[in-house]
Amino acid sequence: MRPEITKIQELMEAAEYVTDAPVATSVHLATRLRKPLLIEGHAGVGKTEIAKVMSRMLETNLIRLQCYEGLDAAAALYEWNYQKQLLHIKLGEASTRPLGEREHEIFSEAFLLRRPLLQAISQESSPVLLIDEIDRADEELEAFMLEVFAEWQVTIPEIGTIKAAHPPHVILTSNRTRELSDALRRRCLYLWIDYPDFEKEVRIVARKVPEINDRLAHEVARFMERLRGMRLSKVPGVAETLDWAQALAVLHADHLDAALVQETLGCVLKDADDIKRFQAEAARSGFSSFLATP
Amino acid sequence: MTGAPGASSGAAPARARADLPSAIIRFAAVLRRHGLPVALLQVTDGVRALSQLDLADRDEVRLGLRVVFVSRPEDLPTFDRCFDEFWRPQTAEETLDFPGMVSPAPDAPEGLSLPGAGDKRETLALDTWGEPEDEDTGEPLGVPGVSDAESLAGQDFSTFSPDQLDEVFRLTIQIARRLARKLSRRRRPRARRGRIDLRRTLRANLNRGDLIELRYRQRRRRKVRLLLLCDVSGSMDLYSRFLLQFVFALQSVFNRVETFTFSTRLTRVTEYLKARSYRQALRRLTEVRDWSGGTRIGESLATFNREWPQVVDRRTIVIVLSDGWDTGEPEVLATELMRIKRRAGRLLWLNPLLGNPSYEPLTRGMAAALPLLDDFAPAHNLAALRELASKLTI
């Protein structure tokens, strides 16, 4: 294994992120090849976390662009501060200066609102740019971003062209609510994050909720593994595991039993049908089957 | 990490290193043959990636190339299989060669094809679908002219002969275009209501010295998406080839479509259908190894709800294409359909059997589904598909 990859793994672990070879390798390649990294996976498996850890690791800023339906290029890149411009015009109404000059004035840096993409290309050192849930944005924005990624420069008609001296490291995340374009996929490196396996989940719990003991951490991970094997409509992610472990820690629990699980089930299962399904399964196979080694 | 021994890495001959680009090119070709969409950019990235990886560590090379060449989780197993074949672990005689790397025999591709015994029939069924497109032997005799379009439109899919396929396809595309236009239409009433649009107002009044003309902004309309769930089980065989052609056509003119096929299990085929020709799409679909088997609609929908819940929202029109022959429990079907209905903007069921006047939806599955549907319509001929336009609104 490359020492750089081992190093990344160490740094990520030091930044409280439990990682493995696939994650470390993709982060390594993304930083070395200077390519955007597209991360897909179920909700709550720690996609966004990677960008945060990466910025801590590289000791650089994290700039986040949260996507939503209807997000347009203006809100992603820059906008003019209209209110301020308006006010400025009003205040200068009595002025006899030529119109062109006045117009030039209100379209200067002072009236520019920098949105995440513009922020990302005007930093002192390469920041980490997190484009979160890109699948929620419209296809048009996707195409627009590809353009930005290609050049790392933005032209604002009234001001001129701004080119990034230090292009950002880009992380895109997607929950797959919409299939992203092939063009975008081609230009990105790709990482799929699945639910963690038993060993990894134990490590995650132990790392993030150190208050609970080793036995309980193992039981929690085993229980989650079993739950994910059931046919649930809302499969709990790592976020749920951690919420649950946190709750168990507050209750000073040191092992799982049927009563405790019933009390805290709401941390893990968030769908009425799923809870019913769990109760039925527990009644049929017995609670202890949830903690048995498969 | 396990894998090839790293000891000999220092001794890697320069010749092998120089050969890396060509090895990557050949590897990319293998991946393409197995249906992965590999572009030139990825090939160059692959070469660049290798220079950043420990070539003696086979697992690292695998993970690294995976990051470059795979762009969706469905392709992961295929990639791993191709990788194992192509970059075989080194054996004793090959120690002099590049560590961890062995070039495949020039005509290895057939040897790489996916294993599996019980899938002959399905694969064959798909193979023959592409046949009638044979461009060169197409003789004008059986090909219907434009004037025949109307008679074609009324003809039941199950009675088409292979030589009518081209014409049917042409018509299918027309219909798909019409549907796409309908779905893309964004009505924006000019009513003087809504919030004042500061930006446009300012722009419009820049030269006037005061805000004379106000501009209004309408809330942006969210776009409609389509979700197609196509039954490809044995009982649908006569219809699914046409319906998939229709789905292919629809997907090629309208990009907010997600398509899944099911018989005993569910497969997302959106990507497979993004091919240049229907033939190519069919070739890709061959990898879906669940064709013409039995039907378990309820189970398949359950899988859908579990794994793809995010695909359906209020602006999604869900269309189930199936004859309703379900070998599973009707309660499961009803429950799962209800789940979809709760989230979807509209739920339609297209049933090719409905074209038959004497048909009554009495199969247990269909009877369970019926009360939940917003619309239940036939899909046995082109005219029925054309009718669909009137139903695609939320």
Image: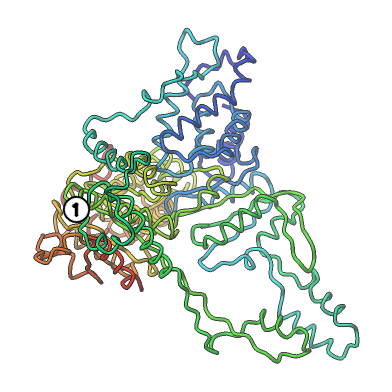
Q: Is residue A35 above or below residue B350?
A: above
Q: Residue beneath label 1, please?
A: B158
> Tag 1's secondary structure?
helix
Query: Measured from the top left, where is residue B250 in percent x and y?
Result: 38, 58
Q: Is residue B280 left or right of residue A259?
A: right
Q: Is residue B282 visible?
A: yes
Query: Measured from the top left, where is residue B282 in percent x and y?
Result: 34, 43
**Of residues A60 and B69, the one drawn nearer to the viewer in this rendering:** B69
**Of residues B296 and A114, the one drawn nearer to the viewer in this rendering:** B296
The amino acid type, in three-letter code, at marker 1 is Ser
**Of residues B268 and A31, the one drawn nearer to the viewer in this rendering:** B268
Instruction: State which quadrant residue B393 falls in.
Output: bottom left
Quadrant location, the C terminus of chain A: top left
Residue sticking out furthest to the top: B93
Query: Measured from the top left, where is residue B138 in percent x and y?
Result: 33, 43
Instruction: State which quadrant residue B39 falls in.
Output: top right
Query: Measured from the top left, where is residue A253 in percent x and y?
Result: 36, 51
Query: Residue at the spot x=52%, y=65% of the render?
Result: A68
Quadrant location, the N terminus of chain A: top right
- Tell me if mark 1 has few (under 14), some (14-19) or many (20+) residues whose alpha carbon lies within 10 angstroms of its own: some
Query: Residue at the spot x=76%, y=66% of the render?
Result: A157
The number of callouts visible is 1
* Chain at tag 1: B
Instruction: State which quadrant residue B258 falls in.
Output: bottom left
Residue sticking out furthest to the front: B141
Q: Is residue A146 above or below residue A85?
A: above
Q: Is residue A264 visible?
A: no
